[in-house]
Image (tube, rainbow, N blue to C red):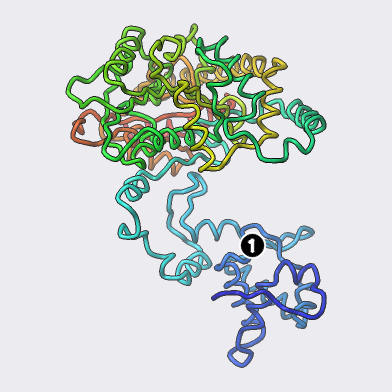
Amino acid sequence: MRVRPILSKQPASPAHRQHGALIQLFEQSDPASTSVRDRLCAALRQAIRLGALSPRQRLPSSRLLATDLQLSRITVEAAYAQIEAEGYITRHVGKGTFVSAEVLAAANGVNPLQGNAPRRSTTKASRKLQDDRPAFAQEKTSSALLSARGAQIIATGGCRDPQTPLPFAAGSPDLRAFPLKLWRQLTNKTLRLGGERLLGYGDPQGHIALREAVAGYLQQSRGVLCSAEHVVITTSSQQALQLLATLLIDNGDPVWIEQPGYLGARNAFASAGAHLHGIPVDEQGVALADNLPPPRLIYLTPSHHYPTGVSLSLPRRIAMLDYAKRQASWIIEDDYDSELHYDGRPLPAMQGLDTHQRVIYLGTFSKVLFPSLRLAYMVLPPALVAPATTLRTVYDGHTSQLMQAVTAEFIQQGHFAAHLRYMRQLYQSRRDSLLTQIKQKLGDWITPQPSAGGLQLAVRLPVGQEAILSQQAQRLGVITPGLSALYLPNADTAISTVKDGWLLGFSALTPGEITAAVDRLQKLGNQRQ
C-alpha cells in the first residue's frame, strides 16, 4: 500500500508529524469491518511491516496516540498490550514503548551474530511478518534479474564487517583504545580554522594537506617513492580497487589473484569482466605461473598476505616486477595492514623497487584508526593520476574534506606515529595471548599459521571439517570466518588445493574476551573426542 502524506488544515502535533503513516493507516481501515482496537492493532502491524515504524523507534504514549486518533486511552492501551504479546513492540516503565528490533531482524532473516546470515524465525510476530511481506520480498532474487557478473558477485555473499566487535570476527581495530578526546580536539580546531571552506566540494584527487602527509609518511616508513602529486585519496581500499578495475580492465582480460586471496579484490575485478586466475601461495608467497596467460593486472598483498600472513620473498618480488615490465602488466600492491608488524621489520614496499612505473600502491586508515573514517589512498604512476582523478568524479566526487583535514593534522602533529606504536604493542600482546590459548586448549585439532603481524590469525582445521565446526562455533556465540571461501574455484586450481581453516580476528578483543571465546571453542574439541 502506498501511504500518502496527511493533509490537514490544523497544525499537526509532534506525535502526528512523527507517526503520520500509522495514523493514516488507521484512518484508511474500514470502520465497519472490525472493532476499533483490532483496527489499531492491524495499523500498527502494517506500519512495522512497511517500515514506516523502524526498529527501536519510540512510539507515542498511549495518551498522546489516543488524543491524535480521538480514541479512549483504554482502547490504545489494549492495542499496545496485544501487539506487545505478539512480539512487535517492547514496553519499558519510565522509558516508553518501542518497535522490537529482534522481531524485525528475525523477519528479515538477519542473524544478530553475523549480521547477514539467515536464521529460522521462532516468534509468532516474526512468522506473521514473513507471511505478510509482499511476494517479491519473500522470494529469493531471481538470477534472471541480474547480469551474469552481478549474480557471480552476489553468490560470494559480498564483503560485510560486523558493526560490533564479536569473537573472532576478523579485521576490526580496537576502538576502545582510540584517542577519541584528542580526535575531538583536533576536529574542533580544524573546523575553527577551516570554517566554511571545509564544508564545500573538494578536490577529487584529495585534500592537499592529507596527500602531503600520506606521501611523507610512506616515504619514511615504507620506502614508497612518491610525492603528493602521485597520491589519490579514496573512501576505502575497496573503492580504489573498483576504480582501478574500471580504469584498467576490459571484458575478458586475464587477471592474476592470490590463491587464497581477498574476496573484495576478486569481486572488483569480476565486476569489470576480468577472467580471474588463481596463483597459489606457499611459505614464500606467490610464484610466477608459467601455465597461465600473461595478465593485464596482478593483485598482491606482498607484505602480509591475506589471509595466510606470509610475506613475499625478495627474490620473488624482483621476479614479479621483471615479469610485469616484460608483459606490460600492472601490479596492485595492497599494503592493507603493513603498519601492524610485530616480529622484526617488514620488507619495504614493492613499489620502492619498481623502476618502470608498473606498481600501484594501496593503503587504508580503516585498520589503524577507525573504520567509519572512510579514508584510504592510492599511489599511482604519473600516467594514471589524471585518469584516476577524472574517474573519481564519476563515482562520489571526493571524500569528506573535514575528515581529510583532521587526519592530516593527526599525522603532521605526530599523533599517528604515537598511536601506531601503542597499537602494535597492544595487538602483539593479544596475538600472543591467542596463540598461547590455542596451544594450551585447542592444539590437538587447530594449527596456527605463522604470522608476523596483522589483526587476525589464520589457523588450519582437520580436512573437511570447516563447515560443520563453523556452524557449531556459531551456536556457541563465536564467529569463525572460514578460509575455504577465499579460494577461487576454476580450471586453473584443483579443488584438492582448497584447505579448511579459520581466520580468527583478535585485535578488538581483550585477553579476557579471547580466553572466554577459546573456552567455548574448547567444547567443540571435547565433542570430537
In the image, 215: left or right of 178?
A: left
**Is 524 in front, or is 339?**
339
**Is 485 in front, or is 80?**
485
Is label 1 in a helix, a strand or a loop?
strand
In the image, 281: left or right of 458?
A: left
Residue at 40% x, 10% y: name it: 355
Callout 1: few (<14), some (14-19), or many (20+) C-alpha neighbours within 10 Å? many
Q: Is residue 229 above or below residue 493?
A: above
Question: In which quadrant of the rendered view does residue 198 lie?
Answer: top right
Q: Is residue 248 above or below residue 472?
A: above
The spot of residue 191 in percent (x, y) is 78, 33
Residue at 43% x, 57% y: name it: 120
The spot of residue 459 in percent (x, y) is 38, 25
Q: Is residue 35 above or below residue 60?
A: below
Label 1 is placed on what type of residue? Val
Residue at 37% x, 59% y: name it: 141
Q: Find disc 1 in the rendering and name its residue.
A: 99
